[in-house]
Image (cartoon, grey):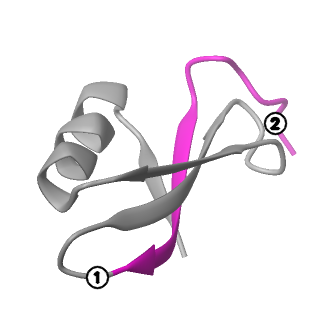
Amino acid sequence: MPLPTPDQRYVRVVERDERWVEFEFSIGDPAIFVELVMPPAQFQSFCRDQHAQLLN
């Protein structure tokens, strides 16, 4: 298994509705994350800007 690197970004959606997306964001290691909440359009921009890989 390759070691995590700081340039790897991950997003795991916890809950989504029409007003908010609640998700976990991690850098390097998907097991270490922060929870964030933002509107759907901002979430899409955030994921694009971070080049984040969506986890199921």
Is the residue 40 above or below the residue 3 in the image? Answer: below
Quarter of the figure that contains the N terminus: top right
Q: Name the side, left or right, on which 55 lies relative to 28.
A: left
Q: Name the side, left or right, on which 46 lies relative to 1.
A: left
Residue 28 sits in which quadrant?
A: top right
Residue 38's disc number: none
Count of labels shown? 2
Which is more N-terminal, label 2 or label 1? 2
Residue 4 sits in which quadrant?
A: top right
Which of the two residues, 7 or 34, is positioned nearer the viewer here?
34
Q: Name the side, left or right, on which 1 lies relative to 11.
A: right
Residue 6 position in % (x across, y down): 66, 17
Q: Judge the density around disc 2: few (<14), some (14-19), many (≥20) Cα neighbours within 10 Å.
A: few
Q: Mark 1 points at which residue?
A: 17
Q: What element carries label 2?
A: loop
Q: What residue type is labelled 1?
A: Asp
Which stretch appears magenta? 1-16
Residue 18 position in % (x across, y down): 18, 79
Q: Judge the density around disc 1: few (<14), some (14-19), many (≥20) Cα neighbours within 10 Å.
A: few
Q: Residue at 27% x, 49% y: name it.
A: 43
Q: Which residue lies furthest to the top in this view?
A: 6
Q: Is mark 1 on a helix, strand or loop?
A: loop
Is the residue 49 above or below the residue 41 in the image? Answer: above
Residue 11: within the magenta? yes
Q: Name the side, left or right, on which 12 lies relative to 37.
A: right
Marks 1 and 2 sit apart, C-alpha to C-alpha, by 35 Å
Q: Residue at 19% x, 44% y: name it.
A: 42
1 or 2: mark nearer the eye: 1
Q: Mark 2 points at which residue?
A: 2
Q: Residue at 47% x, 64% y: name it.
A: 22
Q: Residue at 45% x, 49% y: name it.
A: 53
Q: Which amino acid does label 2 sit on?
A: Pro
